[in-house]
Image (spheres, rainbow, N blue to C red):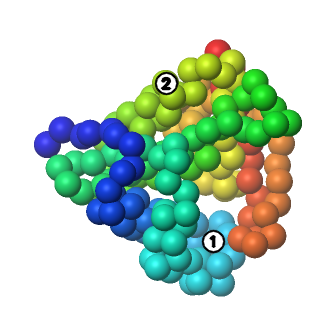
Amino acid sequence: MPITIKPMETEDEIKGKAFVHWKCWQVTYPGLMSQAYLDNFTLEKSEERARAWRDNILVAKEGDRVIGFVGYGSSGPDAPDTGEVFALYVLPEYHGTGVGRQLMDAALEKLAGYPKICLWAVKGNGRAVRFYEKCGFCLTGEEKFTKSVSAYGIRMLKER
């Protein structure tokens, strides 16, 4: 079945995005961030987050099922020439199928006005880093610690 990339709009898409977000965190981050945080990151909390952040979200759908999403936007006033990919998640059973690349390409197209694009990956998430490198991102050497999840993020940058 073909994959469709589209803006998140419907209630079912919000719930689907929330499920993808929750499931990917439960599968990907044990051992990379606080287990207490992961235990408290429930599907309900993920749905609250999905409802609160609706702008600049694209979902990947196979039929009516949301199988991935990407969030993007401006990196903020301190970096007006830089766009950012804030989140990109694909259900584990779709890893290696090209869905992540389709989502990244769609986000990069939306960020076409920016000469630089950055993102943060969780330190230790080698699969994500390799994927982002294949998409043209390079490690910058910058790290930041996020206390709430007890994990380091590593910054990656793509210049056009």
Looking at the picture, which amino acid does disc 2 mark?
Glu
Mark 2 burial class by Cα count in 10 Å: few <14, some 14-19, many 20+: few
Helix, strand or loop at mark 2: helix
Q: Residue at x 70, y 24 (%)?
A: 116
Report how many numbered discs are placed on residues in the image. Answer: 2
Q: Nearer the viewer, residue 40 or 126?
A: 40
Number of other residues with Cα within 10 Å of mark 1, as a class: few under 14, some 14 to 19, many 20 or more: few
Question: Which quadrant is home to the C terminus?
Answer: top right
Q: Which mark is residue 109?
A: 2
Mark 1, residue position:
31
Provide residue 112's location: percent of width, then percent of height.
56, 21
For the point 17% across and 50% down, the residue is: 63
Please identify the residue farthest to the left as the structure is shown.
1
Picture disc at residue 91: none
Q: Position of residue 133 (x, y in %)?
A: 59, 32
Q: Residue at x 62, y 38 (%)?
A: 73
Q: Quadrant of residue 14?
A: bottom left
- 10, above or below 139, in the image: below
Q: Is 54 left, or right, of 142 in this rendering?
A: left
- Please identify the quarter of the rendering in which residue 146 is found: bottom right
Q: Farthest residue in the top direction?
A: 160
- Disc 1 vs disc 2: which is toward the camera? 2
Name the spot of residue 12 as percent of width and height, x first: 29, 62
Closer to the chain start, of discs 1 and 2, is 1
Q: Quadrant of the N terminus?
A: top left
| Residue 21 drawn above or below residue 82 | below
Considering depth in this image, is 153 or 18 the residue closer to the camera? 18
